[in-house]
Amino acid sequence: MRNYENLIIFDPDIDEETREKRVEIVKTLIEKEGKVLNIDRWGVREFTFLINKKQKGYYMLIEFSANEKVLPELNRELKLSQEVMRHSIIRKGE
């Protein structure tokens, strides 16, 4: 298993309950082939340029350890989610 970081930018207009439901879905996907190490909620931050006609987004960093088989499904789930404005999955150095 390898270590990854997943930075997710949520739409700032969604409520906390909806955001947490989406995080639970992500955690469930990760835990099929690995485990969540840490979830760091950065909160609402301003963008330097507009994304989806919005000036702000809610940032969340999820650190996890998983088999690389989980990445395509995780990536697909985040791309299809209307609550997620942007996301990035990065493999951490060993």
Image (cartoon, grey):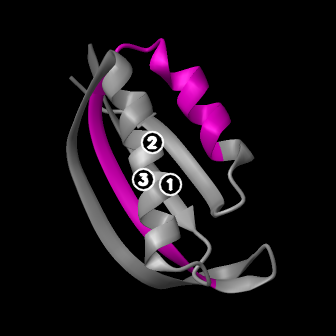
Mark 2 is on which residue type?
Val
**Residue behind mark 2:** 26
**Residue behind mark 3:** 23
Relative side of 30 to 83, left or right: left
Q: Is residue 32 above or below residue 83?
A: above
Please say if the residues under marks 2 and 1 sit with CB atoms less than 8 Å apart. Answer: yes
In reply to whether residue 61 is colored magenta, the answer given is yes
- Secondary-structure class at tag 2: helix
Quarter of the picture containing the C terminus is top left
Mark 3 is on which residue type?
Val
Few, some or many residues within 10 Å of mark 1 (<14, 14–19, 20+): some
Expressed as whole percent of the image width and height from the top left, the position of residue 52 reads: 79, 73
Question: Which numbered disc covers residue 36?
Answer: none
Q: CA separation, marks 1 and 3?
A: 4 Å
Q: Is residue 44 above or below residue 32?
A: below
Q: CA separation, marks 3 and 2?
A: 5 Å
- What stretch of residues is rendered in magenta? 56-78
**Residue behind mark 1:** 22
Residue drawn 63% across and 59% down? 84
Expressed as whole percent of the image width and height from the top left, the position of residue 8 reads: 50, 57
Please say if the residues under marks 3 and 2 sit with CB atoms less than 8 Å apart. Answer: yes
Residue drawn 39% across and 63% down? 60
